[in-house]
Amino acid sequence: MIMKLVNTISEMFPTLGRWINKFVINMLVNKSRHRPHPWSTVHDYVSWTSLTDKNWSARHLPAKTLNPPKQDDAIIDLFKRADGPQLCDKSTCLFPAFAQYLTDGFIRTRMPNKSLGEKDDPVRKQNTSNHDIDLSPLYGRTGAQTDALRLNSETKGERGRLKSQIVGGTEEYAPYLFENGKIKQEFEILDTPLMLDKFAEYPDILSKIFAFGGDRANASPQVSMMNTLFLREHNRLAKEIEQLHPNWDDTRVFETARNTNIVLFIKIVIEEYINNISSGFKFRTDPSVAWNAPWNKPNWITSEFSLLYRWHPLIPDSMKWGGVDYPTQATIMNNNLLISGGLKQSFIDMSTQSAGKIGPFNTSDALIRFEKMAIDQGRLVQLASYGDYREYVNLSRPTKFSDISKNPKVVSILERAYDKVDDVEFYVGMFSEDSIPNSPLPELIGIMVAVDAFSQALTNPLLSEHVWKQETFSSVGWDAINTTKNLESIVNRNVAGGVSTDDFIGITRKGWKSV
Amino acid sequence: MIMKLVNTISEMFPTLGRWINKFVINMLVNKSRHRPHPWSTVHDYVSWTSLTDKNWSARHLPAKTLNPPKQDDAIIDLFKRADGPQLCDKSTCLFPAFAQYLTDGFIRTRMPNKSLGEKDDPVRKQNTSNHDIDLSPLYGRTGAQTDALRLNSETKGERGRLKSQIVGGTEEYAPYLFENGKIKQEFEILDTPLMLDKFAEYPDILSKIFAFGGDRANASPQVSMMNTLFLREHNRLAKEIEQLHPNWDDTRVFETARNTNIVLFIKIVIEEYINNISSGFKFRTDPSVAWNAPWNKPNWITSEFSLLYRWHPLIPDSMKWGGVDYPTQATIMNNNLLISGGLKQSFIDMSTQSAGKIGPFNTSDALIRFEKMAIDQGRLVQLASYGDYREYVNLSRPTKFSDISKNPKVVSILERAYDKVDDVEFYVGMFSEDSIPNSPLPELIGIMVAVDAFSQALTNPLLSEHVWKQETFSSVGWDAINTTKNLESIVNRNVAGGVSTDDFIGITRKGWKSV
């Protein structure tokens, strides 16, 4: 209720509203130590490598040896979805779709290539991130990958475009990756999609894999859907920019469309996605908040961030595509679901189903092995305890198991698994917490997400003081930035016939009211 | 005189002194726009590449097409040393030695490999810099290079050391690069020394080339001398750290010695080198000045910085080594001069000779071709005019040629070369300026050096808020940092018998007094 009042006042008095927005963001970011972090996963002490080599993941707290759980097997019971999905009353299935798309762009733990003899240690301590929100799932991680994805044509009407194809007369998608069962030569430079080997015998799946910039962007039709939306938006912007600036060459049109597209994405991150996470305060995209902020320091994704973002409980056991229910397992890498319904229907489908609730006892069987991998990852990089991290962000440190949760089933499993509350691991503790009102996230995750989200999104160079101006984006791009408020408006301009007031496309459920 | 008073007050009242130091540094850095710079040499407009790909050089001002000079040939006459060297009354020959050693570490314009068909455009628009003061001439630019330079031994008494050899019983140097006329296999990963091909027929020169981290670190015996000093200091620190922490492994000893050595170097940069450039104010190394500063943004070396640092007039026509006068040309890549005198005598030799004066008509014949290359470089990257840059850092914009210099010979050449004062190029204008009292640098260079020096040295991650503490350096390293004030103290602990009060080793001439 107080938050509603604050939001109303902020809207009525814009200057005051900007000041409050700045105050709240600073308050959140200041809950954690500012970068540069002294440590990374390379050494347990400060070294020039730990301070500069971003192939290793940064860390909020130094490596620590915890007492091992007394009964390790018990822990996984905390995650297993026992009595069917618990649903979240606030978020639609666009929430996990967007979260996955967003985080796949910069939370990029390196995966060992076991066939080359690579081991989890050290490979999983490393990452392949650019450490920026740069829409790398769309544009690729490297300049050479971007080149492969671009049309690279100086012909009028084609400048600045990403390669694409039209399916079924009106639906624009990225080109397919395969031709005659082999990856097309022009796309060999792209990172190979993860899990591809599991589908070697499924030509229906393989033939519909898109040539995307990201190796995780084909992982589910929801992520493909997001990437397709921003592909269409890029090409739409390029078309408008080219028409406005007929003398600009292919590269300038491309770069200006990309500048705009990245900022549109960041606006959605803050104003639709983070506002869904927020327990009430309505954040706005004000780049100037960061310009002189002491926390505006070079981004560097941490090990902790990569773990706290594994929101498997968001995924229901099954989801409807075009009215038909598919078990989650059957949707993995299955772009047919997206293609048969088309982009608009897919967005409507995902935004009219509830996401699961983040917390204990709510991970689908199809994903439970990823919980085990997450716990192992925390041990590999020797994270400090759950209690240490609560203390780190100025939350109360638990002194007994029942401080973590009021749920007696949770407490009983924690007691079975750990000798002392100080032994509870970061990953286990944070997903055991009770939920808090009006937010889809429990307390510790919520705070740590906010710290990293604002301190890494608002530091984007496109939002910096001497770049944040119309000429960086062209007047067409600047207009798009200033008028775009949510995913719906981007979908609206990129599907045949647009969307009507009856079509609901949103991350927060239609009609959701805070308590 | 005022500055002397300020310095005296600063020393008497430490808190006030810290505040004044902070105020002066902020005032200087704020003369220029803060990073991130919108442009780099890759595009003439803002692009994601221009904002993120540090292989291209950043730029303070966007690309601009200037009117070409009406008589290009005249320009080089501004640089030619006509009547013998004009000497600087403030700086010794340690000044150019240190300046070259410092800047070779991060001003690293890429050089086209003409034998591979590489062209000046785009290669010379790119760089191979890490954009940090990281002692890369000593440690290499990459982890693999650092590995090749390390002893990599877990044996007690050898941990954390860089490879070295003892010459003549007491003098420690880096190993030689060549064996039987070929680069040793262990050092093939190092960047090949520049200009090596010019000495293919000079075994006396080649056999004394050191295996250094930097491709320019063998360029002159002065630079070799600096690198040798910091090599010895590294190994001295490693020895002390190993003794204090007998349980630390090779890598931890190495990294802790490197942390300390880099900070010692930065201290010399600020407290001896920049204080020699300063026209009077005595700067001190206070890392906290940068912690919350709005200008503390990721470093990125600019095209302008790489040009304004070409201080060829500092080099006399000849220099004495061990009492014998050698023409500059004969000293290039000639480490024999260093080795025959030894480290201490070489430092004494360089610090008891005057450097040349920066300004017009004072570049040695041996270096005049580098002036031509610098002018070409400015044209290649299309720098704005000299007047534009004065305006950029809030200095008066010249409206007539005589605003640049009071020297009629300079004015006459500028009038001959350029149609209008607005056509005067950045490089030509800044080296045509009159000198200013008490500083070895003319006005525009002085300001731009200060802006970049402070905004890029104090942002070093080792000086950051949560890293700047004893445990990052060990107590031995922390002690060294707190007690080291100048090059002399580092030389003193790294030469047999140390240095006495009669030995003068300094960048600023003995007995120099400000006017």
Image (cartoon, coloured by chain):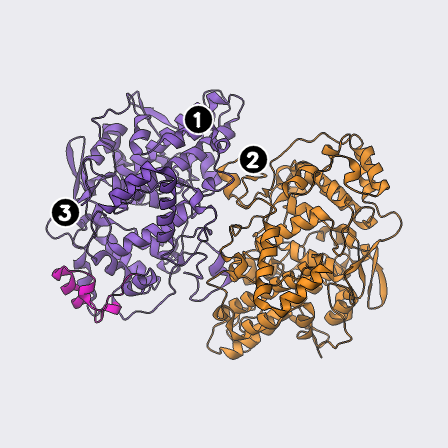
Chain colours: A purple, B orange
Q: Are marks 3 and 1 on the same chain?
A: yes
Outermost right residue: B83
Badge 2 marks a residue whose secondary structure is loop
| Label 1 chain ID | A
Q: Which mark is residue B43?
A: 2
Circle 3 is placed at which residue position?
A: A85
Question: Could you say which is closer to the camera, residue A380 or residue B387?
Answer: B387
Residue B252 x, y percent position in the rendering: 49, 69
Dividing the image into 4 quarters, which one contains the C terminus of chain A? Answer: top left
Residue A212 x, y percent position in the rendering: 37, 36
Residue A413 in view? yes
CA–CA distance between discs 3 and 1? Answer: 44 Å
Q: Chain of mark 3?
A: A
On whether residue A148 falls in the magenta region, the answer is: no
Which of the 4 quarters of the picture holds residue A41? bottom left
Q: Which amino acid, by three-letter code, is at mark 2? A: His
User: Which residue has dot 1 on it?
Assistant: A476
Q: Name the N-terminal-most of marks 3 and 1.
A: 3
Label 1: how many Cα within 10 Å (few below 14, some 14–19, many 20+): some
Quadrant of residue A149 within the rendered picture? top left
Residue at image position (20%, 33%) is A349
Q: Nearer the viewer, mark 1 or mark 2?
A: 1
Magenta span covers which residues?
Answer: A395-423
Residue type beneath disc 3: Pro
- The front one of B352 and B440 is B440
Tags 2 and 3 both on a single chain: no
B202 to the left or right of A244: right
Which amino acid, by three-letter code, is at mark 1? Val
Q: Are marks 2 and 3 in contact (CB under 8 Å)?
A: no
